[in-house]
Image (tube, rainbow, N blue to C red):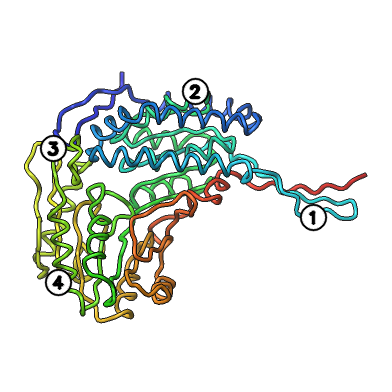
Amino acid sequence: MTTLAVHNPATGAKITDLPADTAASVADKAAKARAAQPAWASMPIAQRMACIAKFREGVVRELESLATTMTRETGKPIKMSRNELNGLLGRIDFFLQQAQAATATETVFDEGGMTEQIQRTPLGVVANISAWNYPWFVGCNVILPALLTGNAVLYKPSEYAAMTGLAIARLLHEAGVPQDVMACLVGTGEVGSALLAQDIDGVFFTGSVATGRKIAQAVGGRFIKLQLELGGKDPSYVCEDADPKAAAESLADGAMYNTGQSCCSVERIYVHEKIHDAFVAAFVEAVKGLQAGDPMSDSTYIGAITRGPQLDVLDAQVADARAKGATLLVGGQRGPGPGNWYQATVFSNVNHGMELMKEESFGPLIGIQKVSGDAQAVQLMNDTRYGLTAGVYTPDGQRARALLAQVKAGSVYWNCCDRVSPRLPWSGVGDSGVGLTLSVDGIETFTRPKAWHLRAA
């Protein structure tokens, strides 16, 4: 039997071996999903909504054990695992509140015996290749609206969050979603490749740019829906009229939350020269106050690095910055083993010739660069192939809007950062991806509009 070994990144210890899928089992699940999808789609939406409401009840009922599982397999601090699950509840509520209206048939013209309508029909069978850093958020951003709109879902969780993926599928099945309509595929990249070879109507992926590019190439000639939520190198600019301490505390959390392993983590900071030194001092103080340790402890803020190979990326960025003249203010090396640990690390005197200001870090590493004013800040914020989020700190709302209007990003923030709302679309520019999740648009993305021309006899 093929298996997937699951390890705890905080200790290196094996947690379990999970039965894994093969090319044959993936093909079987895909065929069953294709056969089961029409009956699911023909079900009244109220019944599909009832299933998702029961799923929500299951999440609430098992929240503590689900949080523990997520922390054990990803290294996410337990408080943040609970935060993710509690935050999911609001997203479920939003999907349930909006699904019926988002999928209702709309009459756009009705005169002289001619009626024109737009009907939103499900895509069919969708593949969801998901991420490990927020497995409940990222997975359910696709799974729930896809199911609500009448699709069948072939869901491959990350191999670094496979136990969580199986829990999501189990709770949906217990809530009444047929097993063939919601299938979980366990395994590594080979299982993902097998999934892409199936008869599917859409691919929804969250992960790295490199893998996203491979997926786009794999399905590029098939004319199916392709949605890619990729990386970010998210900037924030602190203006000279901002409160340096308040901005530093906000941005330290935005940079280090989930151990910096968020696509929308703050990854580079630009500070006006007039308050640069005060901001840096406050930022370093805030970072030094973030406790690292056992992810199962309620007092832990900095957890383990989920993927061992990412430690090499962080080492390389730190070495590059030091070699090119950056000033290391705190951290700068791996934490003691066993497990995957990296110190919260802050550099000043950085520039865009350094990797940590150009390439995604995806860890507790941040560079702070001094700027002369707004024009230089905007130029540097846009000096990237990514465009996920960007923020500005200033008490002047008009100034913030003017600056953020010039920045290429799917989401922008005034006096906040690292924030996602179910009411707003989550999208990116450039190498941050194509398509969107969340908002009413994120429900409609799992449908295709069908045009009806109806003439009375």
What residue does disc 3 label?
339
| The label number, if any, that marks residue 109 in the structure image | 1
Q: CA distance from mark 2 to mark 1?
A: 40 Å
Q: Amino acid at mark 2?
A: Gln
Q: Is residue 26 visible?
A: no
- CA gap, disc 2 to disc 4? 55 Å
Tell me which amino acid carries mark 1.
Answer: Phe
> Dot 4: within a 10 Å radius of its alpha carbon, few (fewer than 14), some, or many (20 or more) residues?
some
User: Is label 2 in contact with label 4 (beta carbons under 8 Å)?
Assistant: no
- The N terminus - image quarter: top left
Q: Amino acid at mark 3?
A: Gly
Mark 3 packing: few (<14 Cα in 10 Å), some, or many (20+)? Answer: many
> Secondary structure under badge 2?
loop
First of labels 2, 4 by sequence position = 2
Residue underneath mark 4: 349
Disc with the residue nearer the chain's start (2 vs 1)? 1
